[in-house]
Amino acid sequence: MNLCKMKAMLALLETPSGFALFCVADSLFNNPACIWSNFAEEAASYNVSYLIDFIKVDDKSVARRMCGNPGEKLADLIRKHKNGRTMFVVDDEELKLVIEKKLSAPCLYKKYAVGELMWGLKNVLRHHLHEEKDNITHEYLLPLCQGIKDLINNFGIDIPTEEIDEQFIVYAGRLFRSDFLLKKRGKELRQRCDKLLPDIGAYIEDDLLYAETMAKILVPELGPTWDFAEKFPSFMVQMLKAAARTAKVKYDLRRLPGPRATALAGAKEWAADRCSRGHKLHIAEKRSHQAVEAAEGAVNQYEDFIDASAGGGKKAKTL
């Protein structure tokens, strides 16, 4: 995603020693529940944000005082980057009022959506702003954003807050995106897979089982470990095995390893490690959701392969 070619806002983030100004894609606010997942890991955050400025401020409380000006350094920062079209995203109502009143700069404050964004920016701050790298503490990231709380609750993940680290957040974001694919793109996934492996979808009504089956056929090394005979009647077993043989011969996926496959393998290793330490992550359920991502990634790669063979230049779709 190229932020220079799309609408963007400027998010003012309070850091341990000052204020950072980020350019963020305004499309993030189209689906507030998904905001945090864009900042679960460093690489994904660069698709929707980048740091444009940073100032150190000794007394950050002056920025919120209604009397006088909102601090010289902060005021200069805002004046430097404001124009008639710029919208500043701020993390509380009082700061919004100060900036709008004293600097005539339009601000956006929506408690839930902005809260998710600010938590996300805090989570990746160490990667964007090296001056603050050694100042990021576990407490700086608390409280957790609502998105992570919901994911932990929805998937029955039993983990104390103090054990939630950077690696946990990375795979929580990937799990969320896999679940998103299942809920929002299940129909599209079926349509795309049906082009590669016709007729199979008509026999499998459950979207979750369908996604697992496609992953097992297209990327068997990353798909579920169960055998077709455990899930389907004999006539279906023969059909699915034939489809797997056809896919293996027709397209060589080894030429197109793809980042999604690598990420999924890492997720499985992490999940297994967490389970061995006594955390109940409901791995059977989690693997089902990850199967959607494996199937989606495989379809992207197969379509690229087909298009490349035909001399086209189609790019794989992304979530």
Image (spheres, helix red, strand yellow):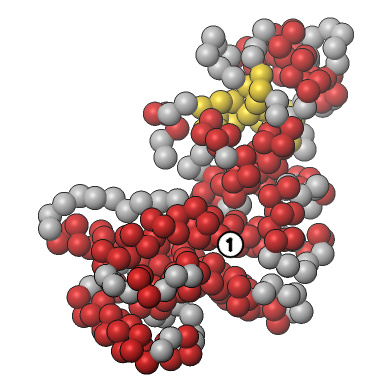
Per the image, the residue denoted by label 1 is 175
Q: Please tell me which residue lies in front, 18 or 67.
A: 67
Q: Percent from the top left, x then y, of residue 271?
A: 63, 73
Residue at the image point whose x is 33% and y is 89% from the top: 235
Residue 175 lies in what quarter of the image?
bottom right
Placement of 312 over or under 92, stated as above or below: below
Q: Please tell me which residue lies in front, 71 or 173.
A: 173
Placement of 218 over or under 171, stated as above or below: below
Q: Is residue 261 left or right of residue 32?
A: left
Q: Percent from the top left, x then y, of residue 27?
A: 51, 34
Element under disc 1: helix
Placement of 282 over or under 194, stated as above or below: below
Q: Please tell me which residue lies in front, 171 or 200.
A: 200
Which amino acid type is marked by label 1?
A: Leu
**Residue at the extreme left:** 311
Residue 102 lies in what quarter of the image?
top right
Residue at the image point whose x is 40% and y is 51% from the top: 318
